[in-house]
Amino acid sequence: MARYAHVTGWGMAVPELVLTNADLALMVDTTDEWIVDRTGIRERRLADKHDTTASLALQAAQRALERSEVRPRDVDLIIVATSTPEHLFPATACLVQDRLGARTAGAFDLSAACSGFIYAVNMAAQAIRSGSIDNALVIGAETLSRIVNWDDRSTCILFGDGAGAFLLQAGEKPGGVLSCVMRSDGSGGDLLSVPAGGSRIPTSLETVRRKLHGIQMNGREVFRFATRVMASATQEAVQAAGLKLDDIELVVPHQANLRIIEAAARGLRLPLNRFVINIERYGNTSTASIPIAVTEAAEAGRVHPGDHLVLVGFGAGLTWGAMVLQWVTPERPVPARRRRLSALWSTVARLRSGLRRLARWLEGLLWGAASAGKEPDESRPSPKTEDRR
């Protein structure tokens, strides 16, 4: 029997702090008119000291689960697509798994820059279709404000923070993720990067002084690349799904630049009202931009059962991709009490995490005491040494 991967839950989370173009004009040499004309952005959300990539990802994941009857303990896999992980390791997805209380879920991070959410949804869908899992949480989460060079007016105006999540479930009804195109071109890796902080250029006083831990971008070349691949990837994904552009109700592009979206619409010969656009309020949130846009479109009533959507994006790497999915809403509404239990479950998850930490500490203490008398005495020669004597 065929299995399909359906999006049955969706959610988003953005910080409360709003940074407007007028605020930026007080920081760098720019104006509201200049930013809007070149990017379409009017404001963006910024993480405060309490917001992290993991905390935003957790909020988005909880809201996605609230739309379904799937409980955290029923989640089999968690993928967090991010360019700003909580740490190099452990994976941000593992932190989300713990705080969510998804105690039987595997978890890992995926790094493909702004294309990462499309890549991650495709991987989760493939795992569902293969029969290895039934339920997956895919999250795009970023705190890009932590790696922006606030002295560089060409990049600091672009980026914002936020998270979006999909819950994917196995189903027998045709639909869900129908096709996906994933592409990359590493020869353009230097066009959009954070040079330092990895193994090639480790962190040092010099890298900090030279601001090599901030985003660096060749805007002109990235723009040319993006306007070319957005249309071609969309067409390729639609064809792979056995559809035509006329069959697509909505295109949800990565929210990087309004002019790039407009160029893609012209290349596809589609009216702009068939695109979901919210860049003016959030800026470029990288992996989070597509799920945030889908969530807002669904909540605004722009997405209906049976609709065909194209998700399309591009990013550093260079990477790009597009996906066609057919929207299928849950067959029965989620009871109100199920939503009210979400906060309680989060509290239980935090308590369980604390108990597991305590159990590991006690285990280490008991194991250490039990094995203390079994450790070798390094002051005595080994049997082989005595034999040689």
Image (tube, helix red, strand yellow):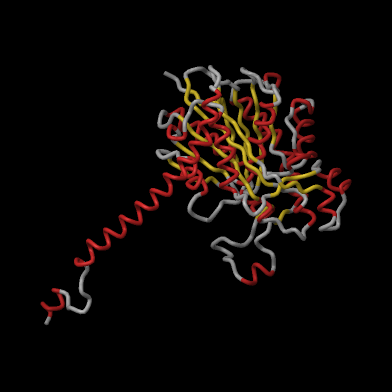
Picture mark count: 0
* Residue occupying the point 46% across, 35% down: 72
Relative vertical location of residue 129 with respect to residue 227 in this rendering, above or below: above
Residue 370 quadrant = bottom left
For the C terminus, the quadrant is bottom left
Residue reaching furthest bottom?
Answer: 389
> Is 312 on the left-hand or right-hand side of 69?
right
User: For this rendering, which residue is in front, 173 or 331?
Assistant: 331
- Residue 49 in percent (x, y) is at 64, 54
Q: Quadrant of the N terminus?
A: top left
Who's the residue at 51% across and 31% down the image? 341
When asked about the image quadrant of residue 291, the answer is top right
Residue 7 seen anywhere in this rendered image of the structure: no
Q: Residue at x 76, y 42 (%)?
A: 257
Instruction: Tell me: 351 left or right of 288.
Output: left
> Does residue 240 lie above or below 375 as drawn?
above
The answer to whether residue 187 is above or below residue 336 is: below
Task: Say whether residue 49 is left or right of residue 69.
Answer: right
Q: Is residue 249 above or below residue 49?
A: above
Does residue 133 appear anywhere in the picture?
Answer: yes
Percent position of residue 87, x then y: 54, 55
The residue at 67%/42% (across/down) is 14
Residue 227 location (% of width, % of height):
74, 39
In the figure, is residue 80 to the left or right of 30?
A: left
